[in-house]
Amino acid sequence: MSVGALYLHIPFCHAKCAYCDFDSRGLCGRALDEAAATYVTQLERRINAFGECGALADVRTVYIGGGTPTVLGERLPALVRRVRSWCEPVEFTCEANPESLSEDLARELAEAGVTRISLGVQSLDNGELARIGRLHDAACALAVIARVKRLGMSVSCDLMCGLPGQTGESWRKTLEGALAAGPDHISVYPLTVEEGTPLARQVAQDPSLEPDEDFQAACMEAARDALTAAGYQRYEVASYARPGHACRHNIAYWTGVGYLGLGRSAAGMLTGTEYLELANLFPSQGDACNLACIAPDDRIRIVQRNDGAARFDAERLSAREAVAEDLMLGMRMSAGVSPELLERARALFGPDHVDRAITTACREGLAAWRDGRLVPTERGWLMGNELYGLMWGLASRV
């Protein structure tokens, strides 16, 4: 038994950004070196355990995220080589921040087998970057994009709209600068204010810092127009790629491919059959997944809760919930939902319930038929909660 995708979480960065609520610790110097040494040793032990039982043999995509994986320095290429000793992925992505991806580290990552860098650019306006606590400036980001391309790796850039102080003009200049740099992939995200973050505290003191949803919608539309005019294809609500450069790892998440998540706070999703074969590698995950109650078509979502992989949270999704989730995630992608998945849904939920949901989505302008597939419309993406809710709601229909 082998899963198709592997995610590794690196919970370190040099400094947490104002908006970040991800599981990461801001460390530098000796404190980072000591914590990283212990953590990577434990992570490699987990990689070996899954490799030895054959669970990694068919992995096609790997993604190392965080945190900021590149703060690991020379430990990161070694980790990449460890993973590649157990599998031969066609896509190997590593997240990076511009200030921590030096020429030497980028070269070592390429030589170790990384094929793709996902770069946290966020903005090309230095004032905006400073206000959200980023450590790089625009010149650094552009230099690193060029560096990654020169070394033969594919590069993706993350951009954010709705940042404090951002204007329509500054957003236009960020888009123009990113396009001029020529990455293979661009993801565009609206800023969200997460509870407990420094940004949330700033917004509580100054409500004008709250992202304006209408402004963000206008930014997303401007990004769509600029990126598609430049030849990028929008394959997911927030993702644009040059032909052949869509992120295969994220597509695996959105299409129900089984994946492992290793490292603190990393999430995985396995079929019931896969989970039963690997259950001994997930100790202390409570009573949520009684082995006797798991069916082959169930899905098990597993989240590692500590550094040493001694504690996990597990959630069982029934076959009905798994198909409803596939429908919901399918509506994130421009390709939409296949006829085969709709037939599975009709068999599980009943044709009347499924067709009623489809009719509602089409009548409200949230979805449409294209070449035999049910696909989201622009309105459906803008009103994602309504569209996704229609699909997920089928799981609770009797």
Image (cartoon, rainbow, N blue to C red):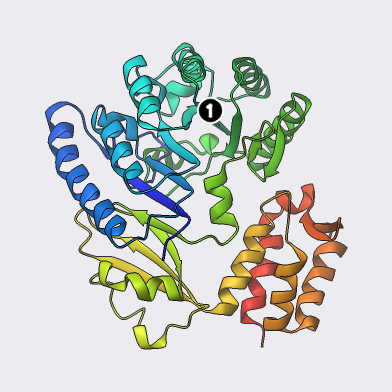
Q: Residue at x 37, y 25 (%)?
A: 111
Q: Is residue 198 visible?
A: yes
Please tell me how crowded label 1 is: few (under 14), some (14-19), or many (20+) other residues with Cα within 10 Å. Answer: many
Instruction: Say if 167 sits above or below 91 in the image.
Output: above
Task: Identify which residue is drawn at 85% across, 70% down.
Answer: 359
Task: Give residue 343's position: percent from left, percent from top.
Answer: 75, 74
Q: Quadrant of residue 38?
A: top left
Residue 28 x/y as whole percent: 20, 28
Residue underneath mark 1: 154
Whether residue 14 can be seen here: no
Quarter holding the N terminus is: bottom left
Front one among 61 and 139 = 61
Q: Position of residue 191 (x, y in %)?
A: 54, 39
Determine the residue positioned at 51% across, 39% down. Answer: 207
Q: Where on the picture, by quarter, is residue 235?
A: top right
Helix, strand or loop under label 1: strand
Work out whether 155 lies above or below 269: above
Q: Residue at x 55, y 25 (%)?
A: 165
Q: Quadrant of the C terminus?
A: bottom right
Badge 1 amino acid: Ser
